[in-house]
Image: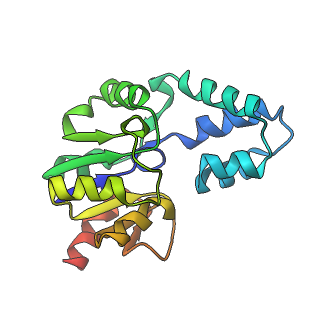
């Protein structure tokens, strides 16, 4: 099985740190749960929703780049699926350096044959251009993401999709724990 992975919220639990940084920039005027909910839609959405100024957006992005890899944890049991897959690729809106720093910190870089980031210049999700590029190159079977935004491009190009930690119409199946992955994959084969 060849798998396309989203990074934030799918491989690594980054949203708590992102939530805390946005909470700081908003001077504690918004509860963390609301920030988390809006960030899960997308960072761009959250910035608009909370009416951040350009200066505040720059500050959030700066703080996010300063998060040490030790503060970003992989989701439990995700490594089992990385080892299981024949090929793994990442498509993320995150910058390349922090992605590589986190992967290297946990020894996960060995699992990925290609990582497409915002630095590659592809249009942002849900545009399917980056997914099509990766699918054409690696004959991908499945895309895994934590937001509908991650799965829409997979559906547009005819790939199977798995929603991690939630539900959405674009998902062929959903899991809330990576231990459930193997049960669901067997049911869908």
* Drawn side of residue 24 relative to residue 78, left or right: right
Task: For the N terminus, give its image quadrant.
Answer: bottom left
Residue for point 16% across, 50% down: 87
Q: How many marks?
A: 0
The picture quadrant where one finds residue 23 is top right
Colouring convention used in this rendered image of the protein: rainbow
Is residue 165 visible in the rendered image? The answer is no
Of all residues shown, which one is farthest toward the right? 29
Along the viewing direction, whichever of 179 and 149 lies nearer the viewer: 149
Give coordinates of residue 108: x percent, y percent: 27, 34
Residue for point 28% across, 69% down: 159
Along the viewing direction, whichever of 53 and 69 lies nearer the viewer: 53
* Drawn side of residue 68 relative to residue 18, left or right: left
Along the viewing direction, whichever of 76 and 45 lies nearer the viewer: 45
In the depicted structure, whether residue 165 falls above or below residue 174: above
Task: For the C terminus, give its image quadrant.
Answer: bottom left
Along the viewing direction, whichever of 11 and 177 lies nearer the viewer: 11
Give coordinates of residue 152: x percent, y percent: 43, 67
In the depicted structure, whether residue 33 falls above or below residue 115: below
In the depicted structure, whether residue 105 falls above or below residue 37: above
Residue for point 24% across, 78% down: 187
Give coordinates of residue 128: x percent, y percent: 38, 60
* Drawn side of residue 134 relative to residue 91, left or right: left
Residue for point 40% across, 34% down: 119
Is residue 15 visible in the rendered image? The answer is yes
């Amino acid at each position: 099985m060849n798998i396309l992975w989203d990074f934030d919220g799918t491989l690594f639990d980054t949203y708590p740190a992102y939530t805390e940084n946005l909470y700081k920039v908003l001077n504690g005027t918004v509860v963390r749960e609301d920030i988390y909910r809006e960030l899960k839609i997308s960072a761009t959405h959250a910035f608009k929703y909370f009416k951040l100024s350009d200066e505040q957006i720059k500050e959030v992005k700066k703080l996010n780049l300063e998060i040490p890899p030790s503060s970003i944890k992989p989701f439990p049991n995700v490594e089992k699926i990385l080892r299981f897959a024949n090929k793994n690729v990442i498509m993320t809106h995150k910058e390349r350096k922090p992605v590589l720093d986190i992967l290297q910190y946990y020894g996960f870089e060995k699992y990925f044959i290609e990582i497409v980031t915002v630095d590659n210049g592809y249009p942002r999700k849900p545009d399917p251009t980056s997914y099509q590029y990766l699918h054409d190159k690696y004959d991908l079977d499945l895309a895994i993401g934590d937001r509908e935004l991650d799965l829409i491009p997979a559906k547009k190009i005819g790939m199977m999709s798995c929603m991690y930690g939630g539900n959405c119409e674009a998902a062929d199946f959903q899991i809330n724990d990576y231990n459930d992955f193997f049960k669901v994959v067997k049911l869908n084969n």
